[in-house]
Amino acid sequence: MRITYRKSSIGYSERQKQTVRSLGLRKLGQSVERPDTTTVRGMVFHVRHLVSVEELPGVDTHEAVETSA
């Protein structure tokens, strides 16, 4: 899945700022690709008002997890 940082975290809780950083997002407009796992989905859920998510075709959840391990 591709996650894009869309809205600044200024004015939001420190926990939400840390979640955005732990997703690998540093600057507005930056995009990162992460495996489609329940952990990543949970993190995205908590900052869904700050990011946008795009599903990547042809990437299997299990393949992405195995290659990163």
Image (tube, grey):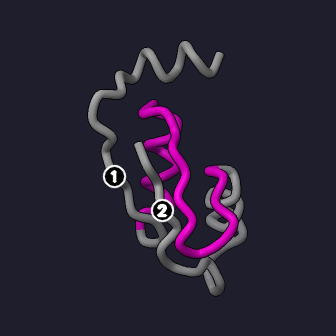
Q: Is the residue under label 1 in contact with that under label 2 (CB below 8 Å)? A: yes
In the rendered image of this protein, does residue 28 appear above or below residue 65?
below
Expressed as whole percent of the image width and height from the top left, the position of residue 14 reads 72, 70
Residue at x-position 39% and y-position 63%: 52
Write the start and end of the magenta stretch as one range: 23-48
Q: Quadrant of residue 66?
A: top right
Magenta stretch: residue 58 in it? Answer: no
Q: Residue tagged by mark 2?
A: 4
Residue at x-position 35% and y-position 22%: 60
In this picture, residue 62 sits left or right of residue 12: left
In the rendered image of this protein, does residue 8 appear above or below residue 5?
below
Residue at x-position 64% and y-position 60%: 25
Along the line of sight, which residue is nearer the eye, 5 or 10? 5
Q: Quadrant of the C terminus?
A: top right
Q: Amino acid at mark 2?
A: Thr
Helix, strand or loop at mark 2: strand
